[in-house]
Image (cartoon, helix red, strand yellow):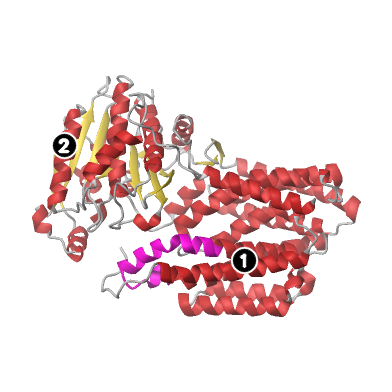
Amino acid sequence: MRWALFLGSLAVALLIGVWALQVPAPRGTGTPAVDFSAARAMTDVRAIAARPHPVGSADHARVQHYLFGRMTALGLNPALQAGALSPEAVERLNRWGGDPAAAGNQAVNIVGVLPGRNPTAAAVLMMAHYDSAWDSPGAADDSAGVAAVLEAVRAIKARGPADRTLVALFTDGEELNLDGARIFFSEHPLRDRIGSVVNLEARGGGGRAFMFETGRGNAETIDLFSRAARRADGGPSSSSLSIFVYENMPNGTDFTIPKNRDIGGVNFAFIGRPSQYHSPTSTPDNLDPGAVQHIGSQALEATDALVRADALPVAGRNVVYGDYLGLFTLVHSLDLGWTLLAITAVLGAFAAWGARHATRLTAADVGRGMLSGLWVLAMGVVFAHGVRVLAGPLTARAESSDVYYTLLRRLPWMEAGVGLAMASIALALLAGRQALGPKLLAGVVVGAVAASLVLGGFDPVVLGAGAIAIALTAWPQSAPKTVWGGWLGLIALVFVFGCAAQGAAPEAALILIWPGLLAAAAAAACALVGALLESPRSLIPAVVATVIGGAWILNLSHQVFLGVGMDLPGVLSLMTLLILLFLAPLAPRASGTLAAAAAACLILACGLSLTARFAEPAPPPAADGPT
């Protein structure tokens, strides 16, 4: 029965998590005029992305002429706004093999206006860029965004007049240096009327669209977005964690420009099918129309809510928020995190009290459980990096932009390999470290560290994690002696990390606080139902927590790896720890079987990662660096 509960709950969590990653079905041309239709938008995508259209090319002029006509047909009275290319943009265009002089050394924006009933009210801006990378048709980046803006404007008009003016801006030169957005927000007469921005982007060719960035002080923006996204096909996809991560990355989009002018708004993108990013394969036929439906529907509902709002969101306090599997968005204040941590502590203490009375649980065994959690994190960092570099160098060591794009094509192989490596660690913990043998485990750690350092370059984090993993592996007394000790130790460790995250970065602390609270509630319920954790009835709370929490963590793991996994694969070690919060009490007492499964997963992980080198061969050396 324990095997059935363990495998069944994990399988259901995995199925739900994968289900929640699916895009909504694209709507056809017969969709009501007031709703977004991917089929209608794809008509524009096919016209725009027929061929690559970088700045200065003949096809760039073709796309500009086409969009001017489409905006005229929508009654937007479009106008062109030209401005000088920045030196950085000229340098990149030269490096691509283009001719800045052919573009007149200028970026040319296309600006259209749908007037509102109140000309004095702050306007709302929808924005996407219409230039492409040099040798890519750019069906996703950013023809899909441009087409979605056109379709959203058409639907907003069909819904009837709004009080606020809607400005549609198709920027130029985004691929070069965000030049079009800089020119608009520094020179255009409408720049000071803009009160909120909705930007659409892409880094790939499919997948769910995430609202991954807002203006600063986003409480009112998130309140409006969470209500608007309920009406969107596919529901919301966003979290304050993604915004925290993105703000600490060197990347930028057109949204960066108004954000730095303290203009609020939301920024959408899809990042699935990464092999299509800046690639000749980014064609209309390869673009996922479901991704277009999701990004367009969310952008439509957010923009419509803004143009019809009595007052636009203003900057104030930030909030913590995250969607649950695209079904709804949870939102709370930054300070509430401390309250949730306090509740977690109370529930954990109650579970410990019940376990102590039933099983004579000791504080020392809980401490050993915390050490087992540290072992998972250390092993996870080492194995993740060791398996990841088998697929190719980290992007910091990529010798050219071609190598970088090759690594993007290998990303699915990397994710599968690193994911299996994390599964091997989880299974090894549940089997008991001694089942695999300390010497064997220590040898595998040394091999993973060596692979990481040789193939990926010196990394003090990997080296330090390797030392911790070896020390804990070689110390048999560090393993918990009871199920309750292991489970509550993991909860206690996540609680400590949650307190640290709440103090340092409360917007990101939800990744620790929410699962920790759910696990503590499950532990308290188990202590009430049957503290011996022997009968199926006593494990029901853990099963429920595994399905609810595990599905969310597995879903989030995919999103995180797509975003940062190519260079920071060790982040999945934290996801592994969080899943173990729910699985720990369900583990079967069959260490030999689990140990064999752990070894098989690790071997398969290495094989998948190595296969990436052959499935997506490296290009010949080139002179330029990653772009």
- Quick one: 516 or 600, which is closer to the camera? 600
Q: Percent position (x, y) of residue 364?
A: 82, 63
Tag of residue 68: 2
Quadrant assignment, res 160: top left
Q: From the viewer's side, name the closer residue of 48 and 235.
A: 48
Which three-letter amino acid code belongs to the residue tagged 1?
Cys
Q: CA distance from mark 2 to mark 1?
A: 55 Å
Magenta stretch, main secondary structure, is helix
- Residue 214 in view of the camera: yes
Element type where label 1 sits in the image:
helix
Does 188 sit above or below residue 452? above
Q: Is residue 309 magenta?
A: no
The residue shown at (66%, 43%) is 340
Q: Which residues are magenta?
A: 392-418
x 35%, y 42%: residue: 262
Q: Which mark is residue 601?
A: 1
| Front label number (2 vs 1) | 1
Which mark is on residue 118? none
Residue 500 lies, in percent from the top left, at 61, 55
* Residue 413 percent location from the top left of the image: 48, 63
Residue at x 26% of width, y 70% of height: 624
Depth check, front residue: 335 or 509 = 509
- Queried whether the magenta region covers residue 398, the answer comes back as yes
Q: Earlier in the sequence, mark 2 or mark 1?
A: 2
Q: Secondary structure at mark 2?
A: helix
Across and down, in percent, residue 337 comes to 61, 44
Count residues near mark 2 (Cα–Cα under 10 Å), then give few for <14, some for 14-19, many for 20+: some
Residue 464, quarter of picture: bottom right
